[in-house]
């Protein structure tokens, strides 16, 4: 059995749901064969989100950590490649904090790569019928903050744990009255299960072109 920690976020930015939490909870409730999973909901707050993530990693002792967030406007499930050491918030977080041009970890490396096999996960998610791509930036808001903090935590305190970040489109209920792409939460949860199952069964990645021109 591979122990997997999924995290999702509380709603932010005026939304009443966050598909990342809904999908993480669904995926953890019915994990794929060979995986035992826990889901933890993080506050959308700089600093506090990372404190809760660290506590959850300590408490649950996972082998894999898959953090999940909402990326409203994106058309598909995105597997994040890289976390950068920058907090630069375009909107206030749920505690009204709005850091600008600050490091996530003072003195930390400029960036970390996800240690999930993102190309193999990409292929498997598509194979499962869910549209997906690789993203080259998780932004500079709370999701990147948590992704960078996760990878720093792993690098410093939990060698052997592998981690990464998945961004999800809006859920359909969020876009009923606006022109934006959406993905049913059940499909997002299926994608998360496939990511966990793929990462649990392979440590080396596939070589598959999924870069961006710009
Ligand atoms: N998405 C935000 C933070 C919480 C979430 O679900 C982001 O992409 O940074």
Image (tube, rainbow, N blue to C red):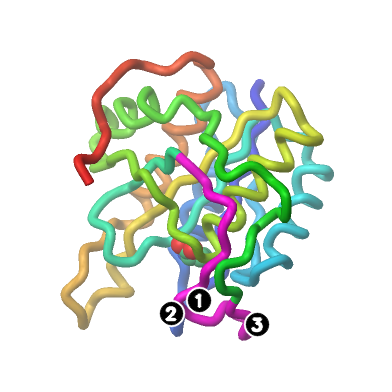
Along the polypeptide, which appears first: circle 2 or circle 3? 2
Q: Is residue 5 left or right of residue 82?
A: right
Mark 2: C-beta under 8 Å from nearest atom of ligand 1: no
Helix, strand, or loop for circle 2? loop
Residue 7: give x, y in percent of width and height: 60, 51
Q: Which residue is mark 3?
A: 95
Q: Nearer the viewer, mark 1 or mark 3?
A: 3
* Crowd class of label 1 (few under 14; some 14 to 19; many from 20; radius 10 Å): some
Q: Which residue is mark 2?
A: 15
Magenta span contains residue 88: yes
Question: Mark 1 near mark 3, Cβ–Cβ under 8 Å?
Answer: no
At x 45%, y 33%, the residue is: 195
Q: Which residues are magenta?
A: 82-98
At x 33%, y 39%, the residue is: 134
Q: Which residue is mark 1?
A: 12
Q: Quadrant of residue 103?
A: bottom right
At x 83%, y 45%, the residue is: 59
Q: Nearer the viewer, residue 188 or 90?
A: 90
Along the polypeptide, which appears first: circle 1 or circle 3? 1
Q: Main secondary structure of the magenta part?
A: loop
Q: CA distance from mark 1 to mark 3?
A: 10 Å
Q: CA distance from mark 2 to mark 3?
A: 15 Å
Q: Quadrant of residue 86?
A: bottom right
User: Which of the image's four quarters has the N terminus?
Assistant: top right
Q: CA distance from mark 1 to mark 2?
A: 6 Å
Above or below residue 142? Residue 144 is: above
Question: Mark 1 near mark 2, Cβ–Cβ under 8 Å?
Answer: yes
């Amino acid at each position: 059995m591979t122990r997997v920690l999924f995290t999702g976020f509380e709603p932010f930015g005026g939304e009443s749901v966050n598909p990342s939490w809904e999908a993480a909870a669904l995926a953890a409730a019915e994990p794929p064969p060979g995986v035992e999973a826990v889901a933890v909901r993080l506050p959308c707050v700089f600093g506090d989100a990372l404190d809760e993530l660290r506590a959850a990693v300590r408490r649950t002792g996972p082998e894999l950590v898959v953090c999940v967030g909402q990326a409203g406007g994106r058309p598909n499930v995105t597997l994040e490649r890289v976390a950068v050491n920058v907090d630069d918030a375009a909107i206030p977080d749920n505690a009204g904090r709005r850091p600008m041009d600050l490091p996530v970890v003072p003195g930390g490396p400029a960036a970390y790569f996800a240690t999930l096999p993102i190309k193999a996960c990409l292929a498997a998610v598509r194979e499962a019928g869910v549209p997906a791509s690789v993203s080259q930036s998780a932004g500079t808001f709370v999701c990147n903050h948590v992704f960078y903090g996760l990878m720093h935590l792993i690098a410093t305190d939990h060698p052997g744990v592998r981690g990464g970040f998945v961004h999800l489109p809006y859920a359909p209920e969020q876009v009923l009255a606006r022109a934006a792409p959406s993905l049913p939460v059940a499909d997002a949860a299926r994608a998360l299960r496939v990511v966990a199952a793929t990462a649990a069964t392979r440590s080396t990645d596939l070589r598959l072109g999924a870069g961006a021109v710009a």
